[in-house]
Amino acid sequence: MSGQRHEVVVRKAEHADVDGLVACSGALFAEDAGTRDPSVDINWPREHGRQRFTAGIDDPDRLLLVADRGGEVVGHLTGVVAEGSAMKPVKVASLVSMYVQPAYRREQIGGHLMGQFLAWAKDKGAELAEVTAYSINTEAIRFYERNGFASKSVTLETVL
């Protein structure tokens, strides 16, 4: 069986996936924020991810998906849904994080993760879905635009 590649399946995360979620999240932090935002603690997933993912698996207002290849987590997506406020009275689903290992990119895994996220958001009654990306991460921005997202606001920062 050597050389045979298992099919990647996108599914809801289970408690047995927590180590894989932490590893994927760590890779995301290192690749994305680690190269684009020195103010982010790239050790956060290793130090806090296990607790966050464990709690999120059973939270009905959070979605944790994994891309599973033969028992190995090769990608993930996390999302939350929140009720509206007096100022913005619409229920919003936020895509918090998404990552696919480089060796598995260009295989439509991100599209499958996104499709399940958007379906979940609709099922939860969300009227809007949102995601943030670093402005320099043009590949991520193009991916989100291909999946129906459009730029709405820009956050500007200065170092003090």
Image: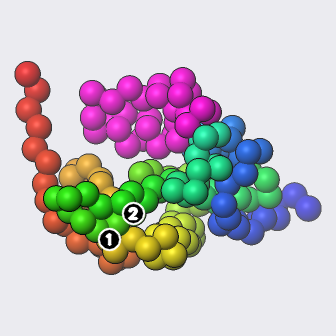
Residue drawn where x is 32% and y is 71% of the image: 128
Residue 40 part of the magenta segment = yes
- Residue position for label 1: 128
Which is more toward the observer, 157 or 88?
88
Report helix, strand or loop for mark 1: strand
Task: Please indicate whether residue 46 sits to the left or right of residue 153 in the image.
Answer: right
- Check disc 2: other Cα within 10 Å, few if <14, some if 14-19, many if 20+: many
Quarter of the C terminus within the rendering: top left
Q: Is residue 39 above or below residue 94?
A: above
In which quadrant of the rendered view does residue 32 lie?
A: top left
> CB atoms at circles 1 and 2 under 8 Å apart?
yes
Residue drawn where x is 80% and y is 58% of the image: 70
- Check disc 1: other Cα within 10 Å, few if <14, some if 14-19, many if 20+: some
Residue 149 part of the magenta segment = no
Q: Which mark is residue 93?
A: 2
Q: Mark 2 is on which residue type?
A: Ala
Quarter of the N terminus within the rendering: bottom right
Rendering colour mode: rainbow
Nearer-N-terminus badge (1/2): 2
Q: CA distance from mark 1 to mark 2?
A: 6 Å
Which is more toward the observer, 89 or 59?
89
Which is more toward the observer, 102 or 158?
158
Report helix, strand or loop for mark 2: strand
Task: Please indicate whether residue 43 sits to the left or right of residue 8 in the image.
Answer: left
Q: Mark 1 is on which residue type?
A: Leu
| Magenta stretch in the rendered image | 25-52
In which quadrant of the rendered view does residue 47 lie?
A: top right
Q: Residue 17 appears at what percent x and percent y?
A: 71, 46
Type of secondary structure dominating the magenta stretch? helix
